[in-house]
Amino acid sequence: MNHWSVSLSIARTHLLSKLKSTVTAALGVTFGIGAYITLVSFMTGLNTMLDDLILNQTPHIHIYNEIRASDKQPLDYLDGLKNDLKVISSVKPKRQPQKIRNALPLMEWLNTNPEVRGATPRVNSQVFYLSGSIEIGGNLTGIDAEQETVLSNFGDYVPQGDPSDLSGTSNNILLGAGLAEKLSLGVGDHVQLANISGELFLFKVVGIYQSGIAEIDNVQSFANLVNVQKVLGVPANHITDIHVKLNDINKATVMAEKIEELFTVSARDINEANAQYETGTSIRNLITYAVSITLLIVAGFGIYNILNMLIYEKMNDIAILKATGFTGRDVARIFLSQALIIGVTGGVIGLLIGYVLSALIDTLPFETEALPTISTYPVNHDPLFYLIGISFALLSTFLAGYLPSRKAGKIDPVQIIRGN
C-alpha cells in the first residue's frame, strides 16, 4: 500500500469536510506571504533608491589636493632653536596649485587596478554666469560624460537633454535646474561664462541638471573636461579631482589609505564622507526583514492553532483509523499532509497576491526632485523574495503541523471509544 497516497487522500477528505477551518488556515498563510512579498519588495526598492541617492553622487573614493598649513614652519628647520620656546601666530597655508600632482600616472594606475571598477577625472572652476543683465557666481565642473553615466548613473539627474551631448569639442553645457530658472534659460539657449580673469566664453545649453539639492542646483553646471580646461587656460594634465568607483565598496577605506601613501594626495573614502550611509542602510534593512518575518511567524501560529482544533474535532476519526490498522506514524503523516497542503495552497496564492500588489505599487505615480527620472514608486521584483516566501510557507506549516500530528499519532483509540 502506498502510505503517502492514502494519507494524502484522507487528509484531503478531512480538509474538505471542514472547509471553513481549512480556508481560514490557508488565508492565514496567503495573507502572511502576500504581505511579506509586498512589504519586502516595496521596502527594499525604497532602500535601494535611498542608497543610490548617496552612492550615485558620492564616489567610493574622492581624490583631491587638499590645501592645508605646512606641518613644519621655517623656525622648525633651525637646529639652534630646538630647545627654545617658539611662538608662531597667524599661520597661513603656502600657495600651491589646486591640481592633483601626477594626475595622469595616477589615472593610469587606477584604471589598471583590478579592484577599481572605474575612475573619472574632473576639473572644478569658479565662474560667473552672464545672461542679459544678470550675473551669478557658481561652479563649472569638467567631466567625462560617458564615464560618469556608466559609473554614477549621471543621466538619472538630467531630466532634460542628453549628457552625451557634452562629448566632443563643442562648447555645450548642462545647467543646474535652479541656475537655469534664475537665468531664464532652457535647452537650446546660450549663456556666457566669465573666468576669474574676466575672459568670456559662449556655451550652448544642451540639458538641465537636477540633483535635488537646491544649494547645488542653484550654482552648479557641467561641461566637457577639455572645454573647462580651456576656460581655465590650463594644460590637459590639469585635474583637480578624481572620482573612483570600486568593485567592492567595503575596500574603500583601505584603498584610500594606499592611494595617499603611494601618490601623496588626499583621498577620502565614502565611509568618511557619509558616515550615516552604512548605519542608515543597516537599520532600514533590519526593520524591513524583522517586520516581514514576523508576518510569516504569525501566519504559522494561526496554522498551528487551527490544526490543534482540527485534531480535537477528529478524535473519533483517529480512533477509527487506528482501529482499522493505521499506525500512529500513519495518523501523524495524515495530519502533517494537511499542514503541507495548506502551506502549498496558501503559499502559492500568497505569492500571486504579493506579485499583483507589488506590480500595482510599481505603477503608482511618484515624483521626487532628488531623482527626477523616477516617475513611479520603486519596487524590487527580486525572484529571491518569492523563493524565500514559498520556502518559509512550507517550513512554517511543517513546523506548525508537526506537533499536532505527533499528538494525533499518540492518541489511544480505546479511551476514545470507551468515552463514546
Image (tube, grey):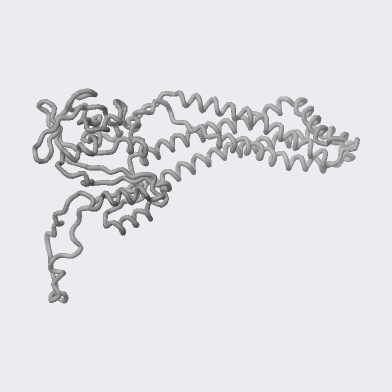
To which quarter of the image does residue 327 belong? Answer: top right
To which quarter of the image does residue 375 belong? Answer: top left
Describe residue 189's horizontal placement relative to residue 272 as left or right: left
Q: Position of residue 190 (x, y in %)?
A: 17, 26
Describe residue 327's horizontal placement relative to residue 77 as left or right: right
Closer to us: 318 or 104: 104
Q: How many labels, in total? A: 0
To which quarter of the image does residue 17 belong? Answer: top right
Q: Residue at x 15, y 70 (%)?
A: 77
Q: Residue at x 13, y 38 (%)?
A: 195
Q: Is residue 355 above or below residue 198?
A: above
Res 53 seen here: no
Q: Position of residue 346 (x, y in %)?
A: 65, 30
- Image quarter (top left, top right, bottom left or bottom right) of the N terminus: top right
Q: Position of residue 326 (x, y in %)?
A: 87, 38
Q: Is residue 323 above or below residue 115?
A: above
Q: Position of residue 341 (x, y in %)?
A: 71, 32
Q: Residue at x 18, y 61 (%)?
A: 70
- Image quarter (top left, top right, bottom left or bottom right) of the C terminus: top right
Res 128 seen here: yes
